[in-house]
Image (tube, coloured by chain):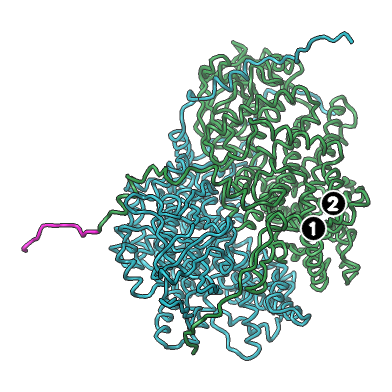
Chain colours: A cyan, B green
Amino acid sequence: MSKAKTSSKGLPPVPVAPRPTESLNEERKAPSFPVREMTYFLDNGREAAEFKDKVMAQLERDPLWRMDNTPDLSLLQLRERTLAKFGNIINFMESEPAPVFWQRMAVLSVVDPAFWTRLGVHMGLFLGAVRGQATSEQLDYWVGKGAMNLGGMVGCFGMTELGHGSNVAGMETTATFDEENDEFVIHTPTVTATKWWIGGAAHSATHCAVYAQLFVKGVRHGVKTFVVPLRDPRTYNLLPGVTIGDIGKKMGRDGIDNGWIQFSYVRIPRSYMLMKHTKVTRAGEVIEPPMAQLAYGALIMGRVSMVVDSANMSKKALTIAIRYAAVRRQFGDSPAALETKLLDYPIHQYRLLPLLAQTFALNFTGIEMTKLYQNLMQRIDNASDGAGLAETIELLKETHATAAGLKAFGTWNCVNTIEQCRQSLGGHGYSSYTGLSNMYTDFVVQCTWEGDNTILTLQCGRYLVSTLRDHRKGKPLAKNVQYLTRALTGIKQFPGRTARDIIQVDALREAWAAVAASAVARATAEFEKALAKGLNKDQAYEQCSTLRLLCARLHCYGYLVNRFTDAIQRAPASLQPALTNLCLLYATYTIQENSGEFLQAGFFDSEQLAVIREAMNDLLAIVRKDAVPLVDAFNYTDYVINSPLGRYDGNVYEAYFNLVKTNNPKHNDIPYFDSVIKPLLTRTSEPLEAPQLDF
Amino acid sequence: MSKAKTSSKGLPPVPVAPRPTESLNEERKAPSFPVREMTYFLDNGREAAEFKDKVMAQLERDPLWRMDNTPDLSLLQLRERTLAKFGNIINFMESEPAPVFWQRMAVLSVVDPAFWTRLGVHMGLFLGAVRGQATSEQLDYWVGKGAMNLGGMVGCFGMTELGHGSNVAGMETTATFDEENDEFVIHTPTVTATKWWIGGAAHSATHCAVYAQLFVKGVRHGVKTFVVPLRDPRTYNLLPGVTIGDIGKKMGRDGIDNGWIQFSYVRIPRSYMLMKHTKVTRAGEVIEPPMAQLAYGALIMGRVSMVVDSANMSKKALTIAIRYAAVRRQFGDSPAALETKLLDYPIHQYRLLPLLAQTFALNFTGIEMTKLYQNLMQRIDNASDGAGLAETIELLKETHATAAGLKAFGTWNCVNTIEQCRQSLGGHGYSSYTGLSNMYTDFVVQCTWEGDNTILTLQCGRYLVSTLRDHRKGKPLAKNVQYLTRALTGIKQFPGRTARDIIQVDALREAWAAVAASAVARATAEFEKALAKGLNKDQAYEQCSTLRLLCARLHCYGYLVNRFTDAIQRAPASLQPALTNLCLLYATYTIQENSGEFLQAGFFDSEQLAVIREAMNDLLAIVRKDAVPLVDAFNYTDYVINSPLGRYDGNVYEAYFNLVKTNNPKHNDIPYFDSVIKPLLTRTSEPLEAPQLDF
C-alpha cells in the first residue's frame, strides 16, 4: 500500500493557450475552395447572395431590429417589437417583387422567427386563404379594405380548435346560413370548438379567416372558409358576439400573440364566405366545385418554405458550434501540453460534421423544391384554364407527398442539428445569451404546425405504397420515384467490395435508391397482407404504419442524396471537390446510421459496411480541414448569428462575458434579501416547545 | 372532366364524442394487474410509496409550493420562490434520517427541478465537498458555522470556469500560499478563469467551495479545494476582492440564481483549504494523499440520482401523454364514425409505449444503482480503515464507469421521452401550461452538467475496452461485465427461428449480451490497431471513439434489460405477466432500433429480425390495453403532474381552457395599441414625395 508523500517537485506550468482569435483565424489560412463562390452557389446565384448581404446590413443598422437583448424581454415587450417590425416591413412588401420579398423573408426568418411567423400568419395564411378561395370580386373587395397593404385590416387564420387540429374535417365551429337575412351565423357550440392557437388573435388582428362547418337548410356541407371581422379597427373593441383571450406563454416564439376565439351567433353577410370553390346562392343552393384538390396547392408553399428554413437555421446553428469548436480547448496529451481544440477530436467531428453535410443537402433540396413549387403553381393556373389537367393533378400529388415528407424530415433534422450543436457547446449551450437554446424552443414548433410531422410522414409513405401498387399495374412513375422500379426487379447485393468501388457518388446514390425501394416494397407487402386479411384500405394503412414511416424516411434520405449529387454536377469546378467530400460524408454517415436497413435489404454485407465506416472516418478528417471556411460560406453576419460564441473573429469569451454582464443587474439588487435570505442566515433551529404533561 | 354540382344531400351529422372523463375511465375497467401493488413494486416497497403519498399531499396544501402559475413568473419571482422553499425544507432536512430525506428529494425533483438543483448545490455539492475533503476538525468547524442547517451560511460550488468545464485539471484560478502570513491568496488571473455557472452565487450564497490550482513556493501542485467567504452574512455585501455577477436567463431552471465570480487577491486562512487528502503544512510542505482515487466516490452520487430522476421525469411525461392519448380523438373510419382515440392508432402506440417500457427499465435500474452506491460507500468507509482496499478500488472503478454510462444513457433517453411525449400532444405540447415544454427545457441540462454525456459515455467505453483487454490476460470480470466473455469465444447466431423460441426474456437478454460484447470487441480491435500503428494509449482511445461511444451505449441497453429481468424475478406473481410484456416490448423494440448491430454481430439474421418486428407489433397491442393503468401505477397526483392534459379524471379540455384563461390578462389590456397597432390600421401608403427636376 502506497504512503502519503511530500511533494516539492509539483506539476509543470500550464501552457499559455493562443488567443481565441488566433485559434479561429488559423482555420482560414488554406481553404480548399473559394469561399465566396461557395456562398453564391449555396444562395442559388450571386445576385441572391448580394441581396442577402444588403438585407443583413439594413437590419443590423435599424434599432427596431436589435436582437442581442431579447432573452430578457417580457412577453409583452416581445410582442410589441414584433408588431412594430410588422409596420416597418410592409413598405418593402409593397415595393418589392414577390420573389425578392421572399428572399428578404428567408433572412428575416433566421433573424427573428417569431416575427416571421406573425407576418406569415397575415401574408401566407390569411391572404393565402383569401387569394386561394375568394372569387375575383371578393378578392378585389378585401384588397380594397386593405388586406394587401395592411391599411385598415390585419388578418389571422382561424383553422385549429381546442379539440381539433390535424383533422380539419372534424372541426365543430358552425356557419349556418340564415336565408331570411342572407347572412351566415358563426358559432362556437362547445369548449372544444374554441378556435385555439390563432396567431395574432390575442392582440393584433382585426379579421379572421374562419374555418367552419357549413350548414344550409339543416344539412351539413363540410368545412368552408369565412372572413369574420373581430374588432372595430377604430376603437379596437371586440365586435358583438366575439370573445377573445390570450393563449399566453409558449415554449418559444413569444413575440407572436396567439389567442383563442369563441363566437356567439356572430352574423356576417353571405358574401363573406369565400366562394371561389363552393358557392352558396341567395336561395340557399350549395354548388360544389369540380376540382377541390387544386386547393391543396396552397398548403405546399408553407411546407416548402419550412424546408428552406430548416436549411437556414441549421446553417446558423452550425456556424456557432463549429467556430466555437475551433476556439475552445479541452484536455491535452499531457499536463504540460497545450489543450486540444474540440474540433480536433474525432468524436467532435463525428457529432458536427455529418450535420454540416446534411445542411448542404437540405440547402440544395430547398432550392429544388422552391423551383418545383413555382412550376407547379404555374401549371395549376394554366390547368384552371383547362390545359393538361390530369397531368397537373399527378404532379400535384407527387409534389404534395414529397413536400409533406420533406417538411417533416427537414424540420426534425433541423431540430436535431440545433440540439446537437447546443449540447456541443457544453454548459454554455444552456445560456440564453449563446443563441441555441432559444433557437431550439423557437424552431421545434415547426415539427407540429402546418401538419404534424408524424402524420405528414405517414402521408408520404401512403403515397409511396400506392404509387408502387399503381406502377405494378403499369402506371409510369413520376421523376422522383423512378427508383421504385427496383422494387419490382428485387434488390441485388452491390458487387464492389473496396473503398475504391463503394465510396463513389453514384454507388452511394444507388445504395439509397435500392434500400428505399426495398422499404417501400416491405411496407406494400404488409399493406397487402392486411388487405388480404379483410381489412379495408384505411385500416390496412394503419396496420403498416410503422413501415410506412420508415419507408418515407428512407425516401427522404435518398431524395437529399440525389439533390446533393445534382448540385455537384451543376457546381463550378472549383467547388466540386469540396462538395463531393461533403456529399460522400453525408451518404456514408447516413448509411452507417441506417445500417440495419442496408443489411436487411441485402444491398451491403457487414464487410462492405465496415469499408463505409472507415471511409466515413477518413472523410471526417478531410472535411474537418474545411470546417470553418464551410460555415463562413453560409455567410451570416455576426448580427444574424447573434451569439458571442459564433463570432466571425473568434473573440468568444470576452464577448460572452460582456454580453452577460451588460444584460444583467448588478449584485446589489436582490429584492428578496430582507424577506427571504436574511431569515435564512439568522435562523436558529429550536425544537417545538410544548407544555409538560404529568400523566 | 367532372362538373360543378349542386349538393343538397350534404354530409352525415358529426357524431357526438363521449365526454373526455368517460373516455379515460373506460381505460381503467379491467387492468391486467393490481395497480396499487405495481406502485409498491416500482417505489421499492409499500413504505416508500406511502411516504411519497404523504410528501405529495403536504406539498399540494402548502401555498409556497404552488406550481400551476409558474409559466408567467419572472426570473426574480422564480428565484425568490426557490429560496423561500429552501428555508421551508430545512426543517425536514434536520428532522428526517438521510435516506428518508432522499426520498423526499426525489419527489421534489419532479415537482420543481430548479428548487431541487438549488438545494442540491448546497447539500450535494458544497456540503459534499466539505464532507468528502475536510479533515474531521475542519468539518466540525464548518458545521459549527451553520453548514449543515443553513444558519449563517449558504454554500455554493466553484468548480467550472468560463474557459474550463470538463477538464478540471486545466482550470486557471490560483490559490497561492503566502507563507509569511499563513494564508492562501485566491485569484482569477484571466477572463476565462472567471468562475462561471456557479449555482446560487448570483443572489444567495455566502460561501463558495473554490477549486483552484495550488501554488506553494512557486510550484504548482494541481487543483485543490478551498472554502472562500463571499459575502458578509449580516449585510450581504460582497467581501473585499470578490466580484460577483448574474448569469441571467437560461434555457430553463430560472429559479436557480447562477452567477459568475472573480477573485482579486482574496486572502483566506491556510485552514480554509480542505485538507483531508492533500495537506499544506505551516512550513509550506505539501503532503499528497496515498489514495486520491477514493475521492471520486463523491461524483457517483450525483450521477446515480440523475438516473433515478430520469426515470421519475419520464413517468411524469408519459402520464401526461398517455392519459391525453386516451382522451383525444382524431379522424374516424368514415365521416359518420366517431373519431378514434390517439391511443388506438398503431403509430401512436409505437411512439409512446416503448418509452413506457423503457421507463420501467430505468426505474429498476435506479433502484439497483442506489443500492450499489450505498454498498460502495460503506466499503470505501471501511477501506479507509485498511480492509479489502484493492477489491474496493475495483468495485469503485466498475461503479464509476457504469454510473457514468448510465447517467448519460438515462438523461439522453429521458430528454427524448419528454420531447416525444411533447410532440405527441400536437400543438398543445407547445403551450407552457401543458407542462412538457418546461419539463424539456428544465431537464435537458442534465445531459451536460456533472459530466458531459458524450465524455461520460466515452469513459464508460474506455472502461469496457480496458476491461476486455485485462480479461484476455486472465483478470476475472466484475459482475456487470461478465457478458464480455462472449467476446473471447466469438458470437454465434441464435439457433431459434420462431417467435416461440426468440420472444423469451432469456433469449433477448442473451441477444443484448452478445451484441454488446461484439461491439466491445470491435472497439478493442480498433484500439489495438491504433496502438499497433504506433499511437500512444490516449491517441488510440481517440481513434476508436465512435466505436467506444457505440459499445458503451449497447452496454447500457444490456444493463437495462438485465435490471428489468431481475425485477421480474423478484416481483409478486400478480405483476409478473404485465412486467414480462413490458420487458419483451422493451427488448424487441430496442433490438429493432439497433438491428444493424445485431445483423453485423451475426446474432440474428433478417428473418429472425422480421419475427422480432412482428412480435413487437403484437406486444404494442397488448401493452396498449394496460397503458392507462400502467401510468396510474406511477402514482403521481394531479398536483405533481401539473398539466391539465394529464389529469387523473380526464377532464382535459375544460381544465386547460380555464388554466389559460385564468393565467392571462383580458383582451382589453393591449399596452401598445395606440403606439403600434393604430398607426398600422390607419396607415395609407404614399410614394415618397420629391421635387421635380427639369434636367
Circles 2, 1 touching at the beta carbon (< 8 Å): yes
- Quadrant of residue B448 in the image? top right
- How far from the left and from the top, in percent, is residue A237? 38, 49
Q: Which residues are magenta?
A: B685-695
Closest to the observer, A188 or B161: A188
> For mark 1, what is the residue?
B586
Relative placement, left or right, of B366 versus A120 is: right
In this view, B642 is above or below A238: above
Relative placement, left or right, of A114 versus B562 is: left
- Quadrant of residue B214 in the image? top right
Work out whether residue A38 can be spotted.
Answer: no
Q: Residue at x 58, y 25 (%)?
A: B204
Residue at mark 2 to residue at mark 1: CA–CA distance = 9 Å
Q: Which residue appears farthest toward the right when viewing the image?
A: B573
* Between discs 2 and 1, the one toward the N terminus: 2
Q: Residue at x 32, y 48 (%)?
A: A62
Secondary structure at numbered mark 2: helix
Closest to the observer, A30 or B406: B406
> For mark 2, what is the residue?
B564
- How far from the left and from the top, in percent, is residue B695? 6, 63
Q: Report the predominant secondary structure element of the magenta stretch.
A: loop
